[in-house]
Image: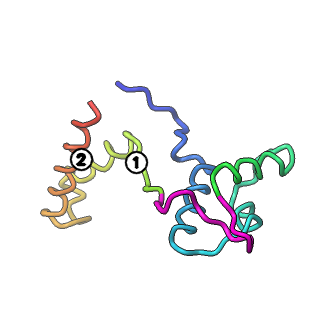
């Protein structure tokens, strides 16, 4: 069995806040440095210097103060192995068949199987 940390980084509050912020900028939301700082969870930054250094590493700022990105791509949501196993179990459980039509369940199971084979 592969190692899966209990608190995986793709599900940390901080990582998800960064993803939401980046995806909002990609979607056209105008955000300033102050807006971005408000989106970040309350962490012990030891002052704003570390938070601002992180923001400057990831985000550019226009002369008017609005944020822009190095690339025009958002960040796709990622599922953990445990979540994918749970999803497959639910889709294959006859008691949960009411959650989605049979053809949709089968299509998702096929995609999960292909993704699982790519991981191994």
Quadrant of res 81 = top left
Label 1, residues with CA under 10 Å away: few <14, some 14-19, many ≥20: few
> Where residue 33 sits: x, y (%)?
74, 64
Who's the residue at 37% across and 26% down the image? 2
Q: Which numbered marker is on residue 112? A: 2
Which segment did they paint magenta? Answer: 60-74
Quadrant of res 76 = bottom left
Q: Pick out the residue farthest to the right.
A: 47
Quadrant into which the N terminus falls: top left
**By what rule are the colours in the image chosen?**
rainbow
Q: With 28 as the anchor, is 65 left or right in this view?
A: right
Q: With 17 as the anchor, is 6 left or right in this view?
A: left
Q: In the rendered structure, which disc, 2 or 1, sits on the residue that comes first in sequence?
A: 1
| Label 1 secondary element | loop
| Closer to us: 56 or 13 | 56
State whether residue 76 is above or below residue 5. below
| Label 2 secondary element | helix
Residues tagged 2 and 1 counted as in contact (Cβ below 8 A): no
Q: Name the residue under label 1.
A: 79
State whether residue 1 is above or below residue 90. above
Label 2, residues with CA under 10 Å away: few <14, some 14-19, many ≥20: some
Separation of marks 2 and 1 at Cα, in angstroms: 11 Å
Who's the residue at 47% across and 60% down the image? 74
Quadrant into which the C terminus falls: top left
């Amino acid at each position: 069995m592969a190692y899966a940390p209990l608190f995986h980084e793709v599900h940390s509050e901080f990582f998800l806040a960064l993803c939401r912020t980046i995806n909002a900028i990609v979607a056209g939301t105008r955000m300033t440095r102050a807006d971005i700082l408000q989106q970040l969870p309350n962490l012990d930054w030891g002052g704003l210097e570390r938070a601002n250094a992180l923001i400057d590493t990831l985000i550019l700022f226009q002369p008017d103060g609005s944020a822009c990105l190095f690339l025009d791509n958002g960040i796709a949501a990622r599922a953990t192995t445990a979540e994918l196993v749970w999803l497959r179990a639910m889709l294959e459980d006859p008691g949960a068949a009411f959650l989605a039509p049979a053809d949709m369940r089968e299509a998702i199971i096929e995609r999960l199987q292909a993704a699982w084979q790519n991981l191994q």
